[in-house]
Image: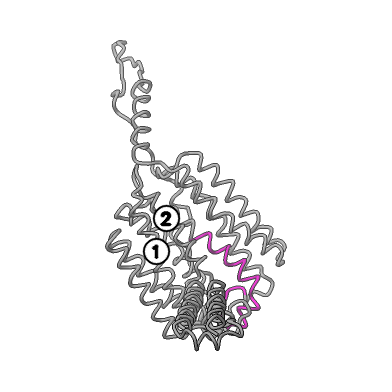
Amino acid sequence: MLRRTSLTSFYSKFLNSFSLRNGNVYNIGSFSSFSSASNPHVCASSATALDLSASASNFVSFTRHYGRCYWELSKARLSMLVVATSGTGFVLGSSSAVDLSTLSWTCLGTMMVAASANSLNQVFEINNDAKMKRTSRRPLPSGRITIPHAVGWASSVGVAGTALLATQANMLAAGLAASNLVLYAFVYTPLKQIHPVNTWVGAVVGAIPPLLGWAAAAGDISLNGMILPAALYFWQLPHFMALAYLCRDDYAAGGFKMYSLADASGQRTALVALRNSIYLIPLGFLAYDWGVTSGWFCLESTVLTLAISAAAFSFYRDRTKEKARRMFHASLLYLPVFMSGLLIHRRSDDQQFIEDKVKGFVKSSSSVEISELEDKNGNQKVKGRHPHQTQARPPVAYASVAPFPFLPAPSYNYFP
Protein backbone atom coordinates (compact mmCIF):
# COMPACT_ATOMS: atom_id res chain seq x y z
CA MET A 1 0.00 0.00 0.00
CA LEU A 2 2.81 2.35 0.86
CA ARG A 3 4.57 1.49 -2.37
CA ARG A 4 1.43 2.24 -4.41
CA THR A 5 1.03 5.61 -2.67
CA SER A 6 4.67 6.44 -3.36
CA LEU A 7 4.25 5.63 -7.06
CA THR A 8 1.14 7.79 -7.26
CA SER A 9 2.94 10.72 -5.66
CA PHE A 10 5.88 10.24 -8.01
CA TYR A 11 3.67 10.30 -11.13
CA SER A 12 1.81 13.38 -9.85
CA LYS A 13 5.04 15.30 -9.27
CA PHE A 14 6.33 14.20 -12.67
CA LEU A 15 3.22 15.39 -14.50
CA ASN A 16 3.16 18.70 -12.61
CA SER A 17 6.82 19.26 -13.42
CA PHE A 18 6.21 18.47 -17.09
CA SER A 19 3.24 20.81 -17.30
CA LEU A 20 5.12 23.71 -15.68
CA ARG A 21 8.13 23.30 -17.96
CA ASN A 22 5.90 23.46 -21.03
CA GLY A 23 3.98 26.53 -19.83
CA ASN A 24 0.64 24.70 -19.49
CA VAL A 25 -0.36 24.31 -15.87
CA TYR A 26 -3.84 23.00 -16.64
CA ASN A 27 -2.98 19.70 -18.35
CA ILE A 28 -1.92 17.82 -15.27
CA GLY A 29 -3.68 14.58 -16.13
CA SER A 30 -5.80 12.08 -14.23
CA PHE A 31 -3.52 12.08 -11.18
CA SER A 32 -4.46 15.66 -10.15
CA SER A 33 -6.83 14.46 -7.46
CA PHE A 34 -4.17 12.22 -5.98
CA SER A 35 -1.69 15.12 -6.18
CA SER A 36 -3.90 17.52 -4.26
CA ALA A 37 -4.63 14.91 -1.63
CA SER A 38 -1.12 13.61 -1.20
CA ASN A 39 0.88 16.84 -1.63
CA PRO A 40 -1.02 20.15 -1.22
CA HIS A 41 2.20 22.17 -1.70
CA VAL A 42 2.37 21.06 -5.35
CA CYS A 43 -1.14 22.40 -5.98
CA ALA A 44 -0.28 25.68 -4.30
CA SER A 45 2.86 26.10 -6.42
CA SER A 46 0.85 25.33 -9.58
CA ALA A 47 -1.70 28.01 -8.69
CA THR A 48 1.09 30.51 -8.04
CA ALA A 49 2.72 29.69 -11.38
CA LEU A 50 -0.66 30.07 -13.06
CA ASP A 51 -1.17 33.52 -11.53
CA LEU A 52 2.32 34.65 -12.51
CA SER A 53 1.89 33.39 -16.05
CA ALA A 54 -1.47 35.14 -16.41
CA SER A 55 -0.08 38.38 -14.98
CA ALA A 56 2.89 38.31 -17.33
CA SER A 57 0.61 37.63 -20.28
CA ASN A 58 -1.71 40.47 -19.31
CA PHE A 59 1.22 42.84 -18.88
CA VAL A 60 2.61 41.97 -22.30
CA SER A 61 -0.79 42.45 -23.92
CA PHE A 62 -1.31 45.73 -22.07
CA THR A 63 2.10 47.06 -23.11
CA ARG A 64 1.69 45.94 -26.69
CA HIS A 65 -1.78 47.47 -26.98
CA TYR A 66 -0.90 50.91 -25.63
CA GLY A 67 2.51 50.94 -27.29
CA ARG A 68 0.76 50.42 -30.61
CA CYS A 69 -1.78 53.14 -29.79
CA TYR A 70 0.94 55.62 -28.83
CA TRP A 71 2.86 54.76 -31.98
CA GLU A 72 -0.17 55.48 -34.18
CA LEU A 73 -1.22 58.58 -32.25
CA SER A 74 2.28 59.98 -32.66
CA LYS A 75 2.35 59.23 -36.40
CA ALA A 76 5.78 57.85 -35.66
CA ARG A 77 7.04 57.74 -39.25
CA LEU A 78 6.10 61.37 -39.84
CA SER A 79 7.63 62.33 -36.49
CA MET A 80 10.87 60.57 -37.43
CA LEU A 81 10.98 62.60 -40.65
CA VAL A 82 10.62 65.74 -38.53
CA VAL A 83 13.48 64.52 -36.35
CA ALA A 84 15.62 63.93 -39.45
CA THR A 85 15.11 67.51 -40.64
CA SER A 86 15.82 68.84 -37.16
CA GLY A 87 18.99 66.76 -36.88
CA THR A 88 20.17 67.96 -40.29
CA GLY A 89 19.59 71.55 -39.21
CA PHE A 90 21.63 70.88 -36.07
CA VAL A 91 24.59 69.54 -38.03
CA LEU A 92 24.46 72.47 -40.46
CA GLY A 93 24.33 74.93 -37.57
CA SER A 94 27.30 73.34 -35.81
CA SER A 95 30.83 74.64 -36.26
CA SER A 96 33.73 72.32 -37.01
CA ALA A 97 32.69 69.70 -34.42
CA VAL A 98 29.18 68.36 -33.87
CA ASP A 99 28.15 67.92 -30.24
CA LEU A 100 26.68 64.42 -30.41
CA SER A 101 25.23 64.59 -26.91
CA THR A 102 23.27 67.77 -27.60
CA LEU A 103 22.28 66.41 -31.01
CA SER A 104 20.79 63.32 -29.36
CA TRP A 105 18.86 65.35 -26.80
CA THR A 106 17.62 67.69 -29.53
CA CYS A 107 16.37 64.79 -31.63
CA LEU A 108 14.65 63.19 -28.65
CA GLY A 109 12.98 66.44 -27.61
CA THR A 110 11.87 67.11 -31.18
CA MET A 111 10.43 63.61 -31.43
CA MET A 112 8.42 64.08 -28.23
CA VAL A 113 7.02 67.46 -29.26
CA ALA A 114 6.15 66.14 -32.73
CA ALA A 115 4.41 63.14 -31.16
CA SER A 116 2.40 65.48 -28.94
CA ALA A 117 1.33 67.67 -31.88
CA ASN A 118 0.28 64.67 -33.98
CA SER A 119 -1.67 63.17 -31.08
CA LEU A 120 -3.56 66.41 -30.46
CA ASN A 121 -4.27 66.60 -34.18
CA GLN A 122 -6.02 63.22 -33.99
CA VAL A 123 -7.94 64.22 -30.86
CA PHE A 124 -9.41 67.23 -32.66
CA GLU A 125 -10.11 65.29 -35.87
CA ILE A 126 -11.63 62.14 -34.38
CA ASN A 127 -14.98 62.61 -36.14
CA ASN A 128 -13.35 63.46 -39.47
CA ASP A 129 -10.99 60.49 -39.28
CA ALA A 130 -13.92 58.16 -38.64
CA LYS A 131 -15.38 59.11 -42.05
CA MET A 132 -12.23 58.44 -44.05
CA LYS A 133 -11.11 55.01 -45.18
CA ARG A 134 -7.40 55.51 -44.57
CA THR A 135 -7.89 56.92 -41.05
CA SER A 136 -10.94 55.09 -39.69
CA ARG A 137 -8.76 52.45 -37.98
CA ARG A 138 -6.74 54.95 -35.97
CA PRO A 139 -6.82 54.45 -32.19
CA LEU A 140 -9.44 57.12 -31.40
CA PRO A 141 -12.04 56.47 -34.15
CA SER A 142 -11.77 52.71 -33.59
CA GLY A 143 -12.22 53.11 -29.81
CA ARG A 144 -8.93 51.44 -28.90
CA ILE A 145 -8.05 54.35 -26.63
CA THR A 146 -10.13 57.01 -24.91
CA ILE A 147 -9.94 60.74 -25.58
CA PRO A 148 -8.81 61.64 -22.01
CA HIS A 149 -6.05 59.04 -22.26
CA ALA A 150 -4.89 60.46 -25.60
CA VAL A 151 -4.96 64.03 -24.26
CA GLY A 152 -2.97 62.97 -21.20
CA TRP A 153 -0.40 61.25 -23.38
CA ALA A 154 -0.09 64.26 -25.72
CA SER A 155 0.22 66.74 -22.87
CA SER A 156 2.84 64.76 -20.98
CA VAL A 157 5.16 64.14 -23.94
CA GLY A 158 4.73 67.71 -25.20
CA VAL A 159 5.69 69.29 -21.88
CA ALA A 160 8.52 66.80 -21.34
CA GLY A 161 9.93 67.35 -24.84
CA THR A 162 9.87 71.13 -24.51
CA ALA A 163 11.52 70.95 -21.08
CA LEU A 164 14.17 68.63 -22.47
CA LEU A 165 15.03 71.07 -25.25
CA ALA A 166 15.12 73.98 -22.78
CA THR A 167 17.52 72.22 -20.40
CA GLN A 168 19.72 70.28 -22.82
CA ALA A 169 19.80 72.69 -25.80
CA ASN A 170 18.63 76.27 -25.23
CA MET A 171 15.49 78.33 -24.71
CA LEU A 172 15.36 79.41 -28.35
CA ALA A 173 15.04 75.82 -29.53
CA ALA A 174 12.44 75.11 -26.85
CA GLY A 175 10.47 78.20 -27.85
CA LEU A 176 10.46 77.18 -31.51
CA ALA A 177 9.28 73.68 -30.55
CA ALA A 178 6.46 74.98 -28.34
CA SER A 179 5.33 77.55 -30.92
CA ASN A 180 5.33 74.91 -33.65
CA LEU A 181 3.21 72.59 -31.50
CA VAL A 182 0.66 75.38 -30.98
CA LEU A 183 0.72 76.31 -34.67
CA TYR A 184 0.15 72.72 -35.78
CA ALA A 185 -2.42 71.60 -33.24
CA PHE A 186 -4.40 74.81 -32.66
CA VAL A 187 -4.08 76.71 -35.96
CA TYR A 188 -3.36 74.29 -38.80
CA THR A 189 -5.67 71.54 -37.55
CA PRO A 190 -8.88 73.63 -37.30
CA LEU A 191 -8.01 75.43 -40.56
CA LYS A 192 -8.23 72.12 -42.40
CA GLN A 193 -12.00 72.26 -41.88
CA ILE A 194 -12.32 75.98 -42.64
CA HIS A 195 -10.14 77.09 -45.58
CA PRO A 196 -7.57 75.60 -48.02
CA VAL A 197 -4.95 78.06 -46.80
CA ASN A 198 -4.25 75.32 -44.25
CA THR A 199 -1.80 73.77 -46.73
CA TRP A 200 0.39 76.89 -46.70
CA VAL A 201 0.20 77.11 -42.91
CA GLY A 202 1.17 73.44 -42.72
CA ALA A 203 4.18 74.17 -44.93
CA VAL A 204 5.35 76.75 -42.37
CA VAL A 205 4.95 74.12 -39.64
CA GLY A 206 7.16 71.74 -41.60
CA ALA A 207 9.81 74.40 -42.14
CA ILE A 208 10.36 75.13 -38.44
CA PRO A 209 12.04 71.85 -37.26
CA PRO A 210 15.30 72.38 -39.24
CA LEU A 211 15.36 75.93 -37.89
CA LEU A 212 14.92 74.44 -34.41
CA GLY A 213 17.92 72.19 -34.98
CA TRP A 214 20.04 75.10 -36.22
CA ALA A 215 19.06 77.18 -33.17
CA ALA A 216 19.90 74.29 -30.82
CA ALA A 217 23.41 74.07 -32.28
CA ALA A 218 24.24 77.71 -32.97
CA GLY A 219 22.19 79.42 -30.28
CA ASP A 220 20.78 81.93 -32.77
CA ILE A 221 19.10 82.18 -36.17
CA SER A 222 21.06 83.56 -39.12
CA LEU A 223 20.30 84.05 -42.80
CA ASN A 224 22.27 81.01 -43.94
CA GLY A 225 20.26 78.91 -41.51
CA MET A 226 17.18 79.52 -43.68
CA ILE A 227 18.30 77.30 -46.58
CA LEU A 228 16.86 74.03 -45.30
CA PRO A 229 13.68 75.62 -43.83
CA ALA A 230 13.02 77.25 -47.23
CA ALA A 231 13.55 73.91 -48.96
CA LEU A 232 11.11 72.25 -46.56
CA TYR A 233 8.53 74.98 -47.14
CA PHE A 234 8.62 74.87 -50.94
CA TRP A 235 8.98 71.08 -51.07
CA GLN A 236 5.85 70.43 -49.02
CA LEU A 237 3.54 72.15 -51.50
CA PRO A 238 4.17 69.90 -54.54
CA HIS A 239 4.38 66.93 -52.18
CA PHE A 240 1.00 67.63 -50.59
CA MET A 241 -0.71 68.83 -53.78
CA ALA A 242 -0.01 65.43 -55.31
CA LEU A 243 -1.36 63.70 -52.20
CA ALA A 244 -4.43 65.95 -52.06
CA TYR A 245 -5.19 65.20 -55.71
CA LEU A 246 -4.86 61.45 -55.17
CA CYS A 247 -7.01 61.44 -52.02
CA ARG A 248 -9.51 64.19 -52.76
CA ASP A 249 -12.52 61.88 -52.52
CA ASP A 250 -11.38 60.77 -49.09
CA TYR A 251 -10.74 64.36 -47.99
CA ALA A 252 -14.19 65.37 -49.20
CA ALA A 253 -15.78 62.54 -47.20
CA GLY A 254 -13.85 63.65 -44.11
CA GLY A 255 -15.00 67.25 -44.40
CA PHE A 256 -11.57 68.79 -45.07
CA LYS A 257 -11.35 71.94 -47.21
CA MET A 258 -8.44 71.08 -49.46
CA TYR A 259 -7.33 73.11 -52.46
CA SER A 260 -7.85 70.24 -54.88
CA LEU A 261 -11.55 69.87 -54.02
CA ALA A 262 -12.48 73.10 -55.83
CA ASP A 263 -10.29 72.23 -58.80
CA ALA A 264 -12.12 69.60 -60.81
CA SER A 265 -9.63 69.69 -63.69
CA GLY A 266 -6.62 69.64 -61.38
CA GLN A 267 -4.96 72.43 -63.39
CA ARG A 268 -4.57 74.90 -60.53
CA THR A 269 -3.42 72.16 -58.17
CA ALA A 270 -0.74 71.06 -60.63
CA LEU A 271 0.29 74.68 -61.25
CA VAL A 272 0.88 75.26 -57.53
CA ALA A 273 3.03 72.13 -57.47
CA LEU A 274 5.02 73.23 -60.54
CA ARG A 275 5.52 76.78 -59.32
CA ASN A 276 6.88 75.73 -55.92
CA SER A 277 9.12 73.11 -57.51
CA ILE A 278 10.74 75.87 -59.58
CA TYR A 279 11.17 77.97 -56.43
CA LEU A 280 13.56 75.29 -55.17
CA ILE A 281 16.10 76.00 -57.93
CA PRO A 282 17.95 78.98 -56.36
CA LEU A 283 18.49 77.23 -53.03
CA GLY A 284 21.62 75.36 -54.14
CA PHE A 285 23.27 78.60 -55.29
CA LEU A 286 22.25 80.38 -52.10
CA ALA A 287 23.71 77.56 -50.01
CA TYR A 288 27.06 78.00 -51.75
CA ASP A 289 27.03 81.80 -51.80
CA TRP A 290 26.16 82.01 -48.11
CA GLY A 291 28.96 79.62 -47.18
CA VAL A 292 26.80 76.66 -46.12
CA THR A 293 28.07 74.18 -48.74
CA SER A 294 30.77 73.78 -51.35
CA GLY A 295 30.25 74.56 -55.02
CA TRP A 296 29.44 70.95 -55.93
CA PHE A 297 26.12 71.24 -54.15
CA CYS A 298 24.97 73.85 -56.68
CA LEU A 299 25.20 71.31 -59.50
CA GLU A 300 23.64 68.46 -57.55
CA SER A 301 20.81 70.60 -56.19
CA THR A 302 20.03 71.98 -59.65
CA VAL A 303 19.82 68.53 -61.23
CA LEU A 304 17.66 67.27 -58.38
CA THR A 305 15.31 70.26 -58.54
CA LEU A 306 14.98 70.04 -62.32
CA ALA A 307 13.97 66.39 -61.90
CA ILE A 308 11.12 67.17 -59.49
CA SER A 309 10.13 70.14 -61.64
CA ALA A 310 9.93 67.85 -64.67
CA ALA A 311 7.65 65.49 -62.74
CA ALA A 312 5.48 68.46 -61.73
CA PHE A 313 5.37 69.72 -65.33
CA SER A 314 4.35 66.25 -66.51
CA PHE A 315 1.50 66.30 -63.99
CA TYR A 316 0.51 69.79 -65.17
CA ARG A 317 0.31 68.66 -68.80
CA ASP A 318 -1.50 65.39 -68.10
CA ARG A 319 -3.47 65.55 -64.87
CA THR A 320 -4.05 61.88 -64.10
CA LYS A 321 -3.62 59.91 -60.92
CA GLU A 322 -0.66 58.11 -62.44
CA LYS A 323 1.17 61.41 -63.07
CA ALA A 324 0.22 62.69 -59.61
CA ARG A 325 1.54 59.51 -58.03
CA ARG A 326 4.78 59.85 -59.99
CA MET A 327 5.22 63.40 -58.74
CA PHE A 328 4.45 62.27 -55.20
CA HIS A 329 7.16 59.60 -55.41
CA ALA A 330 9.60 62.16 -56.88
CA SER A 331 8.96 64.43 -53.89
CA LEU A 332 9.61 61.54 -51.53
CA LEU A 333 12.99 61.02 -53.19
CA TYR A 334 13.88 64.72 -53.31
CA LEU A 335 14.01 65.52 -49.61
CA PRO A 336 16.43 62.82 -48.34
CA VAL A 337 18.76 63.37 -51.31
CA PHE A 338 18.73 67.15 -50.81
CA MET A 339 19.47 66.84 -47.08
CA SER A 340 22.20 64.27 -47.73
CA GLY A 341 23.81 66.65 -50.20
CA LEU A 342 23.75 69.45 -47.63
CA LEU A 343 25.47 67.22 -45.10
CA ILE A 344 28.06 65.83 -47.51
CA HIS A 345 29.07 69.19 -48.93
CA ARG A 346 28.63 71.36 -45.84
CA ARG A 347 31.48 73.70 -44.99
CA SER A 348 32.55 74.05 -41.39
CA ASP A 349 33.95 77.24 -39.91
CA ASP A 350 37.49 75.86 -40.11
CA GLN A 351 37.11 75.01 -43.78
CA GLN A 352 35.78 78.48 -44.55
CA PHE A 353 38.67 80.07 -42.67
CA ILE A 354 41.28 78.02 -44.54
CA GLU A 355 39.67 78.65 -47.93
CA ASP A 356 39.45 82.38 -47.29
CA LYS A 357 43.11 82.44 -46.25
CA VAL A 358 44.13 80.57 -49.41
CA LYS A 359 42.09 82.88 -51.62
CA GLY A 360 43.55 85.90 -49.86
CA PHE A 361 47.09 84.60 -50.38
CA VAL A 362 46.50 83.94 -54.09
CA LYS A 363 44.97 87.36 -54.59
CA SER A 364 47.76 89.11 -52.69
CA SER A 365 50.44 87.49 -54.83
CA SER A 366 48.83 87.86 -58.23
CA SER A 367 46.35 90.69 -58.12
CA VAL A 368 48.72 93.65 -57.84
CA GLU A 369 47.66 95.71 -60.79
CA ILE A 370 50.39 97.89 -62.23
CA SER A 371 49.49 100.49 -64.76
CA GLU A 372 51.80 103.03 -66.23
CA LEU A 373 50.39 106.46 -66.59
CA GLU A 374 52.07 109.42 -68.08
CA ASP A 375 51.81 112.75 -66.44
CA LYS A 376 51.80 116.06 -68.19
CA ASN A 377 55.59 116.09 -68.41
CA GLY A 378 55.72 112.63 -70.00
CA ASN A 379 57.00 110.96 -66.85
CA GLN A 380 55.67 107.52 -66.00
CA LYS A 381 54.03 106.87 -62.67
CA VAL A 382 53.16 103.51 -61.22
CA LYS A 383 49.77 102.96 -59.74
CA GLY A 384 49.19 99.75 -57.83
CA ARG A 385 46.80 98.18 -55.38
CA HIS A 386 47.90 97.41 -51.86
CA PRO A 387 49.06 93.76 -51.77
CA HIS A 388 46.87 92.91 -48.77
CA GLN A 389 43.74 94.62 -50.03
CA THR A 390 41.06 92.15 -51.13
CA GLN A 391 37.83 93.00 -52.85
CA ALA A 392 34.71 92.21 -50.87
CA ARG A 393 32.39 89.64 -52.31
CA PRO A 394 29.43 91.30 -53.99
CA PRO A 395 26.08 90.87 -52.34
CA VAL A 396 23.68 88.27 -53.67
CA ALA A 397 22.02 90.14 -56.51
CA TYR A 398 19.49 87.47 -57.24
CA ALA A 399 18.25 87.29 -53.65
CA SER A 400 15.97 90.23 -54.36
CA VAL A 401 14.16 88.34 -57.11
CA ALA A 402 14.19 84.94 -55.45
CA PRO A 403 10.86 83.79 -53.98
CA PHE A 404 11.52 85.22 -50.52
CA PRO A 405 9.68 85.89 -48.35
CA PHE A 406 7.21 83.09 -48.82
CA LEU A 407 4.50 83.85 -51.32
CA PRO A 408 0.91 84.04 -50.07
CA ALA A 409 -1.66 81.44 -50.94
CA PRO A 410 -3.71 82.12 -54.09
CA SER A 411 -7.25 83.38 -53.82
CA TYR A 412 -9.85 80.71 -53.20
CA ASN A 413 -13.58 81.41 -53.38
CA TYR A 414 -15.11 77.99 -53.74
CA PHE A 415 -16.39 77.36 -50.23
CA PRO A 416 -19.07 79.58 -48.70
Q: For label 2, count other residues whose C-alpha is less than 10 Å away and answer few (under 14), some (14-19) or many (20+).
A: many
Which amino acid, mark 2? Gly
Measured as percent of width and height from the top left, residue 287 is found at 45, 46
Check residue 325 in the rendering and tell me which mark sits there, or answer none: none
- Camera-side residue of 222 and 374: 222
Residue at image location 49% in from the left, 51% down from the top: 339
| Image-based side of 386 in relation to 89, left or right | left
Q: Is residue 257 magenta?
A: yes
- Between the residue at mark 1 and the residue at mark 2, the CA separation in whole angstroms equals 9 Å
Look at the numbered disc 2 and give the secondary structure of its residue.
Answer: helix
- Camera-side residue of 244 and 339: 339
Which residue is disc 1 drawn over?
110
Q: How is the image coloured?
A: one colour
Measured as percent of width and height from the top left, residue 257 is found at 56, 79
Q: Are marks 1 and 2 in contact (CB under 8 Å)?
A: yes
| Image-based side of 167 in relation to 88, left or right | left
Look at the numbered disc 1 and give the secondary structure of its residue.
Answer: helix
Which region is colored magenta?
Answer: 233-260
Residue at image location 47% in from the left, 72% down from the top: 74
Picture layout, residue 65 above or below residue 38:
above
Measured as percent of width and height from the top left, residue 123 is found at 47, 82
Which residue is disc 2 drawn over?
87
Picture layout, residue 288 above or below residue 203:
above
